[in-house]
Each structure stands twice: as structure tokens, then as C-alpha cells.
Amino acid sequence: MSFDYDLFVIGGGSGGVRAARVAAAEGAKVAIAEDSRMGGTCVIRGCVPKKLMVFASSYRESLKEAEDYGWEVTAGDFSWPPFKKRLHKELDRLEEIYRSMLNNSNVEIFDARAKLADPHTVELSTGQRVTAKHILIATGGHPVKPGMDNAELGMVSDDIFEMKELPKRILIVGGGYIACEFACVLHNMGVEVEMFIRKSGILRGFDEEAAGLVSEMMQQKGVKIRFGTTIVDMKLAKDVSFEGRGGTATDAAMGAPASDPVANPDIAGGSKGGTDGPIWVKASNGEEREFDQVLFATGRAPNTNDLGLENTDVKLGRKGEIEVDEYSQTAQPSIYAIGDVTDRVALTPVAIREGMAFVETVFKGNPTPVDHELIPSAVFTQPEMGTVGMTEEEAMEQEPVDVYCTSFRPMQQAFLDRPDRVLMKLIVSQANDTVLGCHIVAPGAGEMIQMAGIAVKMGATKAQFDQVCAVHPTMSEELVTMKTPMRSA
Ligand code: NDP
């Protein structure tokens, strides 16, 4: 049977684009469909714009520190509109690079929504139907809001990059990666940030001691975190009358009610999601509050709706994710799936590796399972957290471990008598001395964990860490100088 294409990729995010290009480089005839912007979540509405916001927001502390180090600094407030303009110009540039890389690889681009009509046929929103020997679903995921009345008043992470102006006060619901990263970024940009977290800690699933320090530092810097609290009701504030109306103490101090868009032009804007007016919120403890925006950072779900999967044997899991085997193959042999739509490890570099392993397996005749073990990652809070391998909690469930941990004031901030603390932690197997996990909370932890991740992935022992000479004076030198376990578990 002959097909129009050897490979049709649905979804132009990091994983889909990489798989398309690499397969084309192997001589395959490849097409890709994307109904939004090429580059997907990571490039257009995720990692990249988020990290640029992290950079933008970090100058607040840097400028303060510069002054204390002796620089004459006249810092003003952060202004969102010029940054936003530059941000979107950069995203346009990156999208163009993705498109030209695909064009240069002879991958045909369809700017259209694609649906499966059968195991080898794709129907495009343009009405066109094409066939392919293999189909790769790389449609990613989307943010989800809790199912509550008026949830449409709240924003999701996609909307942050589209805000016309910064809100004066924002409520962030959730305590995961996205909630914590935006809490820090927005706080440093001058927004009053409050978080409602239904559990007793942030960043569930991360090493608790490391997450605890991030949480402590966030609160010390001014992010208000309410644990064991969630949102039970929300409405436009103008539709409600309650005792808290008329402005907070901070509003009074600033000489203007927060809801006055003339006196406070920063809240006059609004986003695609979210509202133009203040939002009244009722918390699970009965407290009523008012915010200019509410951000739901309550998790993400796989994009499997309206994909025509019912016309195939592709199976979905409990969260709506596409079920795949270790080679990313679905129950329909001609169809593979990679990235967030499979809900394995929802990280860009993982989707890219899954895409590469797919090409290796299908187009290079070298069956390659995807390795999901010991994936380093970073949470771009301020301070950052970098992590690889097992948390203390996971490791002690598995075997007896020694925990090496140190928390201290880093030289740069101690010099200024700032209370900032960092943390370096290794979880070590008592049985064979292997470093099972490494957790770092520090400025630049994302960069550090990439390096530490190599050693941990190679199976390095604690003795081998200790054989490495320290780089002095650095924060990460502690990773090779911790001599005595803090505790055993
Ligand atoms: P997470 O799953 O990390 O966090 C979701 C948060 O929302 C949790 O705190 C969860 O609470 C809470 N929550 C869920 N439902 C409700 C509800 N109904 N009411 C109140 N709280 C609720 O999701 P994110 O959206 O933050 O991130 C999604 C994924 O994106 C991450 O897992 C990660 O893989 C990826 N990502 C990676 C980044 C990076 O590498 N730096 C950055 C951003 C995202 P509970 O813990 O109680 O369930």
C-alpha cells in the first residue's frame, strides 16, 4: 500500500518538531500539522517565556544587592508593557526559527488542526485528507481549572504572557511547579502574591526538606502562602458586597482603593483569560478576599480531545493520556505518541528524547526504549531548586540510606547580612554507597543539577563524589565536601 507520507506528525511542539526533522534527515517523507503556533507549549507559552520572565524579575534583588555592594543604583519599578513587547518579538523570532528548521529539513507544514480518520489517514481542518505509513501524536497538554462556578474569571499560565498590565494583587491557586514559579516571578515584578495551597507544603513529590526551604525563602521574600486552603467560590467583586470591600491596608497606604483603575493603571488591563475587574474570592476557611486576578495553576491534562482516536485502536488512560509502550507505540501499531500527551514525564527534554527514540526505532531499525530514569530537572523559583534521582522520602522506602545535607548562607548574600539560605543534599545508599538522589536549593541550581546529574546518572558513589576536588569558593563545592551524614533513614 502506498501512502502520501512516511510520517505524519500531529503537533508542532518540541517533541513533534524534533521527531519530524530527524525522521526527514533519515530520508523519510514527513509532514507536520500544528493548529496554533509552531514551537508548542515550551517555546510559545511555557518554559521559554517563563524563563525570560524569571530573568526580568531577578533584577529586583540584583539591583538591591548591587546597591549594598557599593554601586550607585537608581532603580525604578518594573514596567510590564515594554517587557511584554520584547518578549513577544522574541517568541515570534523563535517560532520563525522552528518553521525554517522544518522547511530546511523538507518537512511539509500544515497550519491546520489534524484528526485521525483511520489508522493511516489524517483529516485536516482545511478539509484535506492525507495518508501516512506512521502517525506520531505529539499534541501536548493544556492547563486545567478546577470545576467550579465562574472559574472562567481566573487565568491559566497561558494567559500570563498575554496580560495587558500586571495585576496589583493576584491569588495563585495550586502549589506545583507553575504556581511556585509564577508566584516568585510576579512577586519580584512588584505584584502582591498570595497562594492558596490545599496541602501542607509546596511542590508535592519533591524532596520535602528542599521544598521546605524553597517555601520558607518564598515567604521570607514576601509571597504569602496559605496552606490547607483552597478556593470555594469566586465572582466579579462588583456583583458582591462584603466587609472586605473598599480596599486593603496596603491600598490605603498607597492612597487609592485597589479597584480604582484610574488611580491604579496597572490593574486596568486584563488578559485573554482573567478579567478586567477585581474578583471576590471565598476561601475554604470562610474568609472572603478580593484580588485583581486569580491564576489557576492546578495541573495540566493531555490534549486528546477531538483527535479522532475513536477511529483507531489507540487506548486512553485514566487521565485521558494516550497509553504507549516503552517504544512510544500505541495499541494501534501505525500510531505512536510522545510528550505530555502520554503523561509520562511532562518535561520538554523528555519529549525530545522520546521523539528521537521513536525515529531510532521506526526509521533507523534500532528499537530504542525511552530511558525515563534519573531525569534531572529544575524549578525556577527564587531560589531555584534542582533535583535528580530519589527524594529522601522515596529512598528510605526502598532501602537504608545516609542523608548528607547542609544548609547555609551563601557568601554573596551573607556579606550583605541577608537571611537567604541554600541547601545541598545527597541521598546515599548504605548498601553500596551509590548516590541515589541529589537536591539543590540555590541561585543557579538549575545549572548545577545538570552537572551533578551526569555523575548520578553514571551511578557515582559518595566516595567518588568525594574524590573530586572542590571548586573554591562556590556553593556547590559542598557537594564534594560533606563528610558526615546528617542522619540515616
Ligand atoms: P502540578 O501537578 O505540578 O501542580 C498542580 C498543583 O495544583 C498541585 O499543588 C495540586 O495540589 C494543585 N491542585 C490540583 N487541583 C486542585 C484543585 N482542584 N484545587 C486546588 N489545588 C489543586 O502542575 P503544574 O500545572 O504546576 O505543572 C504541570 C507540569 O508541567 C509539571 O508536572 C511539570 O512536569 C511541568 N512543568 C515543568 C516546569 C519545569 O521543569 N521547571 C515548569 C512548569 C511546568 P496537590 O499537590 O494537592 O495535588
Image (tube, rainbow, N blue to C red):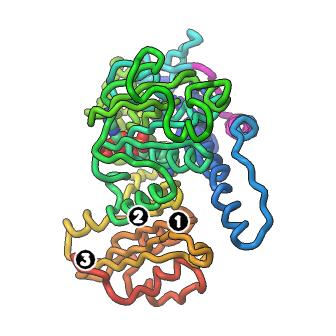
Element under label 2? Answer: helix
| Residue placed under numbered mark 3 in the picture | 401
Q: Tell me what residue is drawn at x 31 percent, y 84 percent.
A: 485
Give the foreground label among 1 and 3.
1
Bounds of the magenta segment: 88-112
- Would residue 418 be visible to someone looking at this image? yes
State the image quarter where residue 447 is shown.
bottom right
The correct choice, above or below, for 1 with respect to 52 in the image is above
Q: Given the image, on which type of amino acid does mark 1 rest?
A: Ala
The reply to whether the C-beta atoms of the residues labelled 2 and 3 are less than 8 Å apart is: no
Q: Given the image, on which type of amino acid does mark 2 rest?
A: Leu
Instruction: Give the mark nearer the N terminus: 1 vs 2.
Output: 2
Q: Is the magenta stretch mostly helix, strand or loop?
A: helix
| Residue placed under numbered mark 1 in the picture | 445
| Residue placed under numbered mark 2 in the picture | 213
Q: Given the image, on which type of amino acid does mark 3 rest?
A: Val
